[in-house]
Image: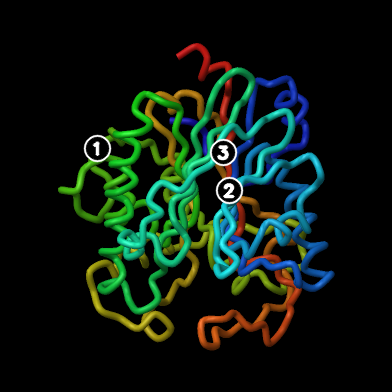
């Protein structure tokens, strides 16, 4: 088991990464990012991206490429299939010298909209990294809005389709599945991905991952989360916050398969929703995993939005970067080549 890190990536690691030996890979759900965000939010997001210092970043809830370009440094290239009517699109940004080779939707047909809502289809981006080709599958699963009893089957269906896609299109390839799964690593949708089977239930793993290795599952041991910190640390003055939220994983598991009211019944709101899974041939290449716990990511006033006749309307442009924080791993390319 690799060591779990909970602090910000040390800047000295970048000197090793630029030699082409290590990649920092992250995923970040940015709350309904469009090009009209406030200047303060833009500056806060730019600081998060700068201090995250990742070579590859998967994004969710992006309105269009211009919105993402507005916050990214110039040395990033963006992969995104833009639908002008969609405000929660997926994207992948890679930093030079990495190169985007191709991009496509895995399941674009409307018949798969139950599993992949609206235009949030699974985004497959192939990336050239120092002679290796990495296949990134960016995912944003159906939210839990409406209750888990009603929405769990949709996330589980998406997981089954992802397994099918990997088996049919990416067998024996370097695969990285990452994004906002709207479940935690012990929920059934993630267990389907970890074992590559549909005959699994939700709950704590009783055997090692046999299809995809969930790098972020180790974070559960320390009750580390990726969503909900802004409610806990929105007024924090220190530069770094403690990402461990006692009881978070237990609270998630307590309500599995039960009907409940989220606002009234759930005591611990923070949860690990954003995750990174890799194909088993990359497991030994994963060196570290963590969450971005600089307070700049969770401080600020919230934006207020509303959907009116299917259109997103901002009632307030806040300064809070997002209701999520980035999750990251470090991948040793030397171990990828030597497998």
Cα separation between marks 1 and 3: 22 Å
First in sequence, mark 3 or 2: give its number. Answer: 2
Residue in front for this viewpoint, 31 or 323: 31
Q: Report the Cα–Cα distance between label 2 and label 1.
A: 29 Å
Residue, far left:
199
Q: Give the numbered dot on residue 207.
A: 1
Q: Which residue is mark 3?
A: 329
The relative height of residue 152 versus residue 161 in the rendered view (above or below) is below
In the picture, the disc for residue 219 is none
According to the picture, the residue beneath numbered tag 2 turns out to be 58
Q: Residue furthest top?
A: 338
Q: Is 287 left, or right, of 234 in this rendering? A: left
Image location of residue 256, percent across then percent down: 27, 67
Q: Where is the N terminus found, in terms of image quarters?
A: top left
Vertical placement of residue 183 versus 174, above or below:
below
Q: Which of the two discs, 1 and 3, sits closer to the camera?
A: 3
Assign a secondary structure to mark 1. Answer: loop
Q: Residue at x 60, y 39 (%)?
A: 25
Q: Are marks 2 and 1 in contact (CB under 8 Å)?
A: no
Q: Residues within 10 Å of mark 3 (few under 14, many from 20)?
A: many
Residue visible at 38% across and 36% down? Answer: 213
């Amino acid at each position: 088991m690799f060591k779990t890190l909970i602090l910000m990536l040390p800047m000295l690691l970048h000197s090793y990464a630029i030699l082409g030996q290590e990649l920092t890979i992250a995923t970040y759900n940015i709350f309904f990012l469009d090009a009209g965000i406030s200047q303060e939010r833009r500056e806060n997001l730019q600081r998060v991206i700068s201090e995250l210092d990742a070579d590859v970043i998967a994004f969710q809830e992006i309105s269009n490429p211009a919105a993402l370009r507005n916050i990214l440094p110039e040395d990033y290239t963006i992969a995104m299939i833009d639908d002008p009517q969609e405000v929660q699109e997926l994207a992948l940004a890679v930093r030079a010298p990495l190169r985007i080779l191709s991009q496509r939707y895995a399941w674009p047909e409307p018949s798969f909209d139950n599993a992949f809502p609206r235009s949030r289809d699974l985004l497959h981006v192939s990336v050239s990294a120092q002679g290796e080709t990495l296949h990134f599958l960016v995912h944003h699963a159906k939210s839990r809005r409406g209750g888990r009893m009603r929405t769990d089957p949709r996330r589980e269906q998406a997981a089954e389709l992802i397994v099918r896609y990997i088996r049919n299109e990416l067998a024996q390839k370097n695969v990285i599945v990452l994004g906002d799964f709207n479940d935690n690593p012990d929920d059934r949708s993630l267990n389907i991905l970890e074992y590559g089977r549909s005959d699994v239930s939700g709950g704590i793993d009783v055997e090692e991952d046999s299809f995809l290795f969930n790098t972020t599952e180790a974070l559960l041991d320390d009750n580390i989360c990726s969503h909900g910190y802004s409610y806990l640390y929105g007024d924090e003055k220190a530069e770094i916050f403690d990402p461990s939220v006692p009881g978070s994983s237990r609270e998630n598991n307590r309500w599995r398969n039960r009907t409940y009211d989220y606002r009234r019944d759930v005591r611990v709101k923070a949860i690990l929703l954003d995750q990174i899974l890799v194909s088993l041939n990359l497991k030994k290449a994963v060196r570290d995993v963590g969450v971005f716990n600089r307070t700049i990511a969770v401080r600020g006033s919230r934006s207020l939005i509303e959907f009116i006749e299917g259109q997103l309307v901002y009632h307030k442009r806040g300064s809070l970067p997002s209701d999520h924080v980035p999750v990251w791993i470090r991948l040793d390319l030397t171990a990828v080549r030597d497998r």
